[in-house]
Amino acid sequence: MPDTPADPPGLDLARLRAHLDRALPGTVQGPLRAELIEGGRSNLTYRLTDGTSRWVLRRPPLGHVLATAHDMGREHRVMTALRDTGVPVPATLLLDRGTDVLGAPWYLMEHVPGTAHRDAAALGALGEQRVHALGHRLADTLATLHRIDPAAVGLADFGRPEGYLERQLRRWSTQLEASRSRELPGVDRLHGLLAERLPASPAPALVHGDYRLDNVLVDSSDRSGDTITAVLDWEMSTLGDPLTDVGLLVMYTELAGVGGGIIPSAATAPGFPAAGELVARYAENTGRDAADLHWYVAFASFKLAVVAEGIHYRYRQGRTLGTGFERAGEMAPVLAEHGLTSLDALKER
């Protein structure tokens, strides 16, 4: 970090410091510095330090922001509720729902050690056996989340499970229209078929909404094992159909490395379990029937296509921070094709 504190885009350090001194007196001891953590494609994440302690701050992206897609309060609430469960999450420190400090809502949480694995080479350096075991821990952690009783952690009113899939389709279709800047026939056809073939949901659970390998932190400092120290990026969490999380994990595993890194390549590392093995591990730990996920994988493809279009829209406006956004526009047609292929497999059953 530089010797002189500087404001990264999206943060006003003077305003932030003044607010922290009022809200959390004595917490920040020295000059406050911040840096944008690269790799995110949605909310902006910053590492803060006063030279002694470290924290992490999250805020929505700059510019074009889709309604309800970057809900800081929701993310803060679910992590606070899960703090004493078997799902590892950072401790939350402060939520600001206003816009006076940073021009948007934001929250502060503890800094947790660990790596968000996106790259196959870096993950593969652990060796096949450890990579394989980590894949199992990823499935186990999702199973732990889905076994939690929402009422027991104060989240009984966190969503409306009834009609969840119908609402999700409407929501993502609406967000697609809000970011539409070109014709996307494959994405539109995928949406229509998803609506026609809507499945009956199993018993509801607390859903993460974007569960994948690079949304967890892994601490490999102890060579006896690689510990998942935190599950991150909870802005799309709710009560709903747990198989949406499983379908998303399958989709990210099947498409790992596609788009020149737009979809992380880590799941291609030697030893990482195939999608079917992850599903079997999850089913064993939850007792849920996850044998037929074709619709859910197609739905995950549709969601990510909409996210990619939103990134493409902001990139064309010059409102993205960091690198790697220039290829986001390539991904919507690729994801639509993957979703349509998944639905074809469903039709053939």
Image (spheres, rainbow, N blue to C red):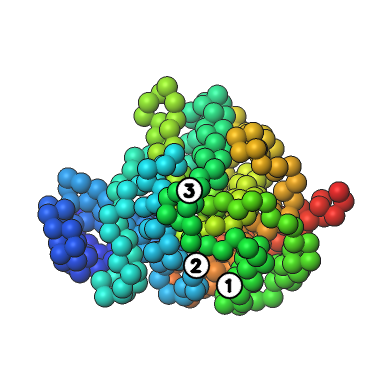
- Name which quarter of the figure residue 155 lies in: bottom left
Q: CA distance from mark 1 to mark 2?
A: 9 Å
Q: CA distance from mark 3 to mark 2?
A: 17 Å
Name the element at disc 3: helix
Foreground residue, 209 or 217? 209
* Identity of the residue furthest to the right in this view: 348
Looking at the image, is mark 3 or mark 2 earlier in the sequence? 2
Q: Is residue 91 left or right of residue 20?
A: right
Q: Residue at x 54, y 36 (%)?
A: 140
According to the picture, the residue beneath numbered tag 3 turns out to be 215
Which percent across, then down, holds residue 202?
A: 67, 51
- The amino acid type, in three-letter code, at marker 2 is Ala
Q: Residue at x 36, y 52 (%)?
A: 80
According to the picture, the residue beneath numbered tag 2 turns out to be 69
Vertical placement of residue 306 versus 151, above or below = below
Vertical placement of residue 49 versus 139, above or below = below
Which percent across, then down, holds residue 145?
A: 51, 44
Q: Is residue 22 left or right of residue 84?
A: left
Vertical placement of residue 277 versus 177, above or below = above
According to the picture, the residue beneath numbered tag 1 turns out to be 175
Q: Is residue 11 visible?
A: yes
